[in-house]
Each structure stands twice: as structure tokens, then as C-alpha cells.
Image: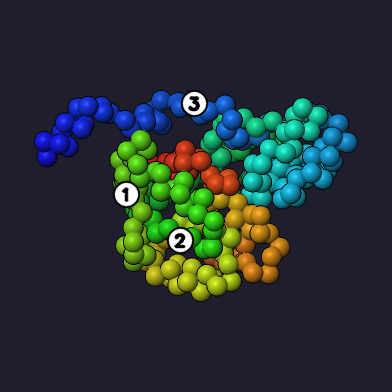
Amino acid sequence: MFKVISNRLEQGYRTTTYPKEPIQLYSGFRGLPEINSQCDPVIVRQCADLCPQEAILAAEKKIDLGRCTFCGECAQVADGAFVRFSQNFEMGTAHREDLITSGSLPDLAAHAKIHFKKLFGRSLQLRQVSAGGCNACEADTNVLNTPFFDLSRFGIDFVASPRHADGLHVTGPITVNMKAALLATYEAIPAPKLVIASGCCPISGGPFHGSGEIVGDLNSLIPVDLYIPGCPPHPLTTLHALLAFFK
């Protein structure tokens, strides 16, 4: 106990003050894209042809964040004449179609289901399932349990058993081999329950889109309540989405 108290006095308080105070990410972070709707269609088409995810809708001058891996290739075309990436990490949405954006997203809190608080009170227990992911999304989700983010202070925790959970947090492209296990986990969670698709893989298949070895679109299996884009989503993107939608 003496060592614990000594370490605390030595290290001080390390937990971020977000969301009470804004937080600035490093300059290289690629967040919500800023799109020039007046851009020359030729440049837009060049960006679309370059995109490995086919996430750019050239005719509509929009980007599908559910497919985007934020590689930044499009921002290199014509010195970012069509797309530039901001440092805005607040990108969660309640509806899949909202991720197809021209540079803005609806207020997530306004789309939150008010009855969530009535159902779950001041706590939210989630069961995390990696449905065939590369472990990047899982790693950046685990970071939320470190002292800097301290997810538990908001009453949100990840639990081992689906029977103890209020909802399902899914990462990975949902491989064929993981489909049955994922559905079994979903069925084991008592109703009412909610589902979160975290990362471009469960939202659209991500880099594995079109492969016969994956299911890809989580919403085609079970109804999704919250979408968190990214590859992987930044821990703050996940934290903001959880707080805005459920709190």
C-alpha cells in the first residue's frame, strides 16, 4: 500500500480531462475529412481512381467513411485540392448512410436513443468480439482501459461473459469461420441489447471487401446501433462515440 501511495504522489494525476476540456491530437492524425465541393471533377476522379477502398463517390463528391482506411492518398492529389484530413476525431454515427459524407456528420447525441439511459442506468457493460481482425482495432480499444483514458470512470466496462453484457462491440471483417461464434455471442446477451460496429472492417469489410472468406457488413447479420469509422478508430474516436451516444 505504501508503494501505491508513493507512486501516486510521484506520478501525479495522469488521466485526461477530456471531454470536460478539448484535447489536441498530433499534427499527423487523419480525422474527419474536409471536402472541397467546388473541386474540379477531373481531380475528384483522380482521387477516386487512386482510392484502394473505392471509398470516394466522384459523382457526388463524397467519401464513404465506412470504407475509408484513412490512408491519405487522396489528400496527396493536387496538394489536397479535393480532400484534406482534419484533426477532428469525433466521427461516430447512428446510421450507416451518415458515413457517406461531404465533410460533415450529424450530431451523434441528437441521434442517441434516449431510452438507453433508462434501460442501463449510469453503467454500460460491453462484450468485445474480434471477428477476424488484425488486432489494430482491439489494441486501440484496450488503450481505453489505461489510466490516461480510464473508461471505467464513465461507468463503461468491457466484460468477459456476454451474459453480463448490455451490448456487443465488434471489430474485424467477420470471417466465415467467426460468423457462428459471433451470432452465438449476440444471442447470449440478454435483451434489451445494442450492437457497435467499430472500424471499417465490420462496417463494410474494409481492406477485405469483396472477399468470399468474410461476411463484411455486420448490419447484414444483426442490427447495428452505433458505427465508429477508422482503421483503426482512434481511442478518442471510440470514447467520444460511446459518451455521446449513451451518456
**Label drawn at residue 24:** 3
Query: Count of labels shown?
Result: 3
Mark 2 or 1: in front is: 2
Q: Quadrant of the C terminus?
A: top left
Q: Position of residue 126 (x, y in %)?
A: 39, 56
Residue closest to the eye, 37 or 151: 151
**Label drawn at residue 240:** none
Q: Which tag, 2 or 1, sits closer to the chain's start?
A: 1
- In space, the residues marked 2 and 1 are separated at their CA atoms by 20 Å
- In space, the residues marked 1 and 3 are separated at their CA atoms by 28 Å
Image quarter of residue 37: top right
Residue at image coords 11%, 36%: 2
Residue picked out by circle 1: 123
Residue closest to the eye, 148 or 34: 148
Residue type beneath disc 2? Val
Residue reaching furthest front?
3
Residue at image coords 55%, 47%: 232
Residue picked out by circle 2: 129
Residue type beneath disc 1? Ser
- In space, the residues marked 3 and 2 are separated at their CA atoms by 30 Å
Q: Which tag, 3 or 2, sits closer to the chain's start?
A: 3
Q: Quadrant of the N terminus?
A: top left
Q: Position of residue 174 (x, y in %)?
A: 56, 64
Relative horizontal placement of residue 52, taking residue 206 as reference (left or right) = right
Relative horizontal placement of residue 178, taking residue 9 as reference (left or right) = right
Image quarter of residue 127: bottom left
**Helix, strand or loop at disc 3?**
loop
Relative horizontal placement of residue 89, taking residue 242 as reference (left or right) = right
Check whether the beta carbons of the residues at disc 1 and disc 3 lie within 8 A of each other: no
Residue at image coords 66%, 59%: 208
Image quarter of residue 13: top left
